[in-house]
Amino acid sequence: MKSAKILASALVVFVSISTYAQTVDEIVDKHIAALGGMDKLSAVKTLYTERSLSVQGMEIPSKSTVVVGKSLRTESSVMGNSMVQVVDGSSGWMIRPAMMGGSGDPEDMPADQVKQQLSQLDPFGPLVNYKSKGNTVELVGKEKVDGKDAYHLKVTTKEGQTVDEFLDATTYLTSKIKMMMNGQTGEISLSNYKDVDGIKFANTMEMTSGQAGNLTFTTEKVTVNGKVDDAIFKKPAK
């Protein structure tokens, strides 16, 4: 009799875990479908984006080129000065003007900064193909984000980083992300999604962090699978 009760309890736990896992996967699958579907997302090999960053009354234009899973180059213009940041594989380099503590010459990017940039090589986030990436996902529950219901998913990457993603309960698109930024908790609110080649991209990103303050990024152009010259990721000689 006692064994039967133990078996019954174990089955309840098993069914609960199975249902929970299915619920997480169902939400993630709807998120992937909302972005454009796995076939379209998997077909993206390069991504070129032009944005404008609004900070302290200044508008800073930037453009980034991503070879998915491999390389990233970001160029920004600050008060007439050009800043370049490049990650290629597991290493990186940058060019900083004197006003930002640099010399204007190419220099190696510190390892911790390279690590922070690596997530940008994965433009659709840690939920897409999360199992094959070695990530785990937990459904924390349903919460309000800007007055709207959202699913709170806690993602733990295989590197041990924790990312809290909030998916709008109606659209299944990401409305907010919480993660560590330079040792402090930061938040990114995403909105104004627009379709490019059948894929949804957030055209407005509002970032809040203790170190950087409040930043607003507005996307002005997105090109999917444009031609990219690998030479742009190579560190030039001084």
Image: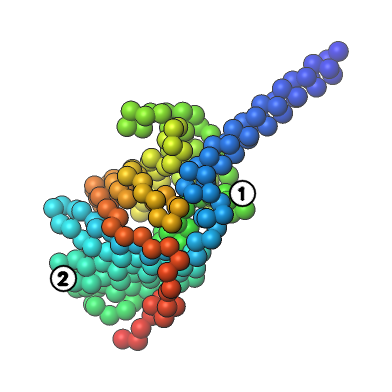
Image quarter in which the N terminus is found: top right
Q: Name the residue under label 1.
A: 131
Image quarter in which the C terminus is found: bottom left
Residue found at x 59% / y 32%: 23
Which colouring convention does the figure follow? rainbow
Q: Quadrant of residue 72?
A: bottom left
Q: In this view, does 149 lie above or below 81?
A: above
Query: Along the polypeptide, which appears first: circle 2 or circle 1?
Result: 2
Q: Residue 80 carries which label?
A: 2
Foreground pick, 171 / 75: 171
Residue found at x 24% / y 47%: 214
Foreground pick, 56 / 45: 45
Q: Residue 48 carries which label?
A: none
**Residue 167 appears at what percent x and percent y?**
44, 38
Residue found at x 33% / y 73%: 94
Would you say 27 lies left or right of 22 here? left
Furthest residue toward front: 197
Numbered circles on residues, count: 2
The reply to whether callout 2 and callout 1 are in contact (CB within 8 Å) is no
**Dot 2 amino acid type:** Gly
Foreground pick, 213 / 172: 172
Q: Quadrant of residue 231?
A: bottom left
Residue found at x 45% / y 53%: 198
SS for tag 2? loop
Foreground pick, 162 / 57: 57
**Residue 103 appears at what percent x and percent y?**
23, 77
**Dot 1 amino acid type:** Lys
Would you say 131 lies left or right of 105 here? right
SS for tag 1? loop
Would you say 175 lies left or right of 59 here? right
**Residue 180 appears at what percent x and percent y?**
39, 48
